[in-house]
Image (tube, rainbow, N blue to C red):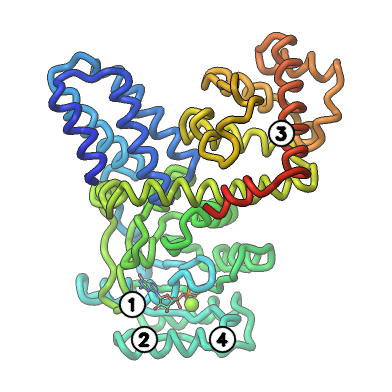
Amino acid sequence: LTERLQNALSGLRRKGKVTDADLRETMREIRMALLEADVNFGVVKEFVRNVREKAAGAKVLDGLNPAQQIVSIVNDELTAMMGEAAVPLNKSAKIPTVIMMVGLQGAGKTTTAGKLALKLKTEENARPFMIAADVYRPAAIEQLTTLGEQIGVPVFELGTQVDPREIVKQGLAAAAEAKADYVFIDAAGRLQIDEALMQELVDVKEIAQPDEIMLVVDAMTGQNAVETAEGFDQRLDITGVTLTKLDGDTRGGAALSIRAVTGKPIKFVGQGEKMTDLDVFYPDRMASRILGMGDLLTLIEKAQKDFDEKEAEKQMEKMKSNTFDFNDFIAQLDQVQNMGPLEDILKMIPGMANNPALKNAKLDPKDMDRMKAIVYSMTPSERENPDLINPSRRRRLAAGSGRPIVEVNRMIKQFNEMKTMMSKMMNGNTAGMEQMMNA
Ligand code: GDP
Ligand code: MG
């Protein structure tokens, strides 16, 4: 565990009794550590909620050794969210086992195929075989053949002018002839998911009937890894994930997010460029990596700063163009709830501390949740065009969110006031805001 977290926990230990405030403080540290480790925001929320519930259920508040209970609950929950144990490669009952490598360009598909082939060769004395089906990436075929030579694994290729579907068909026949027991299909990637790629991969899947569809994800892509994983899983129903480039300074939060969002197991992790730099994925080790790297204090500061900056930048643009809508409103509520009391944050903004408009600004977290419930009852077009929300729509929102109509009206009024205030600020003196963003 990190130093700061350790301090929070040893504080608890000394007291021998945990107060609500202690638990909140500890959970705040944990939440920040997770966010900084690039765990998806929704996943963090769910995680913190789970731990809170479990901590409360376990009567941590007046238990014998509450600090230890919290630590073990956090560890268990983190590990559980990534799957309890290491999940091995799928294997076919009769040879060959077909493994289709998919993922974005540069994620590490080709490298991982080589690493896995070498691993099977050395550990199981297996006879792997590789098919070069990425005809788009420059020099991809050459890369795979060079790799094959290096690790002593045959590579089937037909150059770049043949359709990948045809290459796979012929490659599988060649693999059968060679009596290979594992066939790796090094499929094409793209810089971003697009329909042409997905259709090609769906067709290749249909032809090859792979036992394993291994999605390769670059751990350094952080939050984007989740979208990537979701996109590939929706179309291809992936069976496993390899997380590459964990040898960098990434904290591996992508592992937690991918697992939570797709439900598919992470099977291997890439830890370097060498052919031997591949390890089985162990959820418990990843849990300590996510929680335990670096100096949490700096991380927390950085997490807050990055998060603020990006969101603030986006919302500044919105405010400037006066298109701030309910989606932005929700994003802002989330951000505020995540960072602590609104009053404190506002005070950090230069020139804001003494602003009379903020004298009575006090937002109860429960109020924010109620506001969110109302926004969640809105249709996408209502969120984007707040002006659409007429009286009959307000009644529907009240029914949908289970809040009284007066509250809906008040919320919309507050939203409009906020919007006006912001646009005034933006058109008046923006120095303070700019300064905040560059701080
Ligand atoms: P592909 O486009 O998905 O086939 O990606 P490649 O296999 O060509 O890998 C892209 C780059 O990432 C190459 O330079 C690899 O050496 C590098 N790479 C792949 N896996 C790892 C890893 O686990 N750690 C590090 N440091 N580099 C990796
Ligand atoms: Mg490749």
- Residue placed under numbered mark 4 in the picture: 138
The residue tagged with tag 1: helix, strand or loop?
loop
- Left or right: 177 with respect to 409? left
Mark 2 or mark 3: name the one nearer the start of the chain: 2
Q: Residues within 10 Å of mark 4 (few under 14, many from 20)?
A: few
Mark 2 or mark 1: name the one nearer the start of the chain: 2
Instruction: Measure the C-alpha gap from mark 4 to mark 2.
Output: 17 Å
Comparing labels 4 and 1, the label whose residue is closer to the camera: 1
Kindly identify which numbered label has been placed on residue 326.
Answer: 3
Comparing labels 3 and 1, the label whose residue is closer to the camera: 3
**Label 4 residue near ligand 2, CB within 8 Å:** no
Q: Is residue 290 above or below residue 74?
A: below
Mark 4 or mark 1: name the one nearer the start of the chain: 4
Residue 237 visible, this orientation: no
**Label 3 residue near ligand 1, CB within 8 Å:** no
Q: Disc 3 residue type?
A: Phe
Mark 4 or mark 3: name the one nearer the start of the chain: 4
The residue tagged with tag 2: helix, strand or loop?
helix
- Residue placed under numbered mark 2 in the picture: 148
Comparing labels 2 and 3, the label whose residue is closer to the camera: 3
Residue pictured at 59% horizontal, 51% vertical? 435
- Residue placed under numbered mark 1 in the picture: 273
